[in-house]
Amino acid sequence: MKLFGKILDWFEEIVMGVGLFVMVVFNFLNVICRFFLPQTPFSFTEELTLLLFMWVTMLGISCGYKRGAHTGLSLLTDVLPTAMKKICVVFATFGSLVLMGVLFWSGSVMVQNQLKFGNIMPGLKISAAFGGLSMPIGSTIVFFRVIQTGIQKVLELDKQEGQR
């Protein structure tokens, strides 16, 4: 399981880094060409940027969970006893898992429809399902990270409770 986590860490960070780099470079080139040339040679960059943005966003959510940087209202939970904190962690984990399940389901339906109706991105000339796949695949990765973070938080609370 640790090896899977390390591979996932590597995958997330490489894809996000490369994706952000490509987005910045192509957007910069597109703006420069629009300013200096009457016709931009990069008509596909808007679609490429949107495609990469979808993937980077889903992987960014996963990294946020991995680092414990997801949104949380600690103002209330910090004053609770440890047992109540555990209940809050379990509730938040369960809610996040439900949300990822909904994203997986709706993303899967969207991809099926994109494939069924042959949606093509006109600039890139590829199936729109490449972007749509970011939802079911990304939500699966986030699902794993939510479980990982939930377990880690409960273990940390158990450790704190044992030290008192």
Image (cartoon, helix red, strand yellow):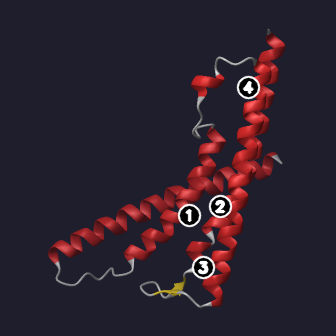
Q: Position of residue 21 (x, y in %)?
A: 43, 60
Q: Is residue 155 visible?
A: yes
Mark carried by residue 43: none
Residue tagged by mark 2? 138
Quadrant in the picture for residue 102: bottom right
Residue tagged by mark 4? 85
For label 3, the SS is: helix
Residue type indicated by callout 3: Ala
Q: Is residue 86 left or right of residue 99?
A: right
For label 2, the SS is: helix
Residue tagged by mark 1? 55
Q: Position of residue 164 (x, y in %)?
A: 79, 8
**Which tag, 2 or 3, sits closer to the chain's start?**
3
Asked if 101 appears above or below 42 in the picture, the reply is: above
**Which tag, 1 or 3, sits closer to the chain's start?**
1
At horizontal 75% and vertical 38% (from top left) the residue drawn is 91
Residue type indicated by callout 4: Lys
Mark 4 or mark 3: which is in front? 4
Marks 4 and 3 close (CB-CB < 8 Å): no
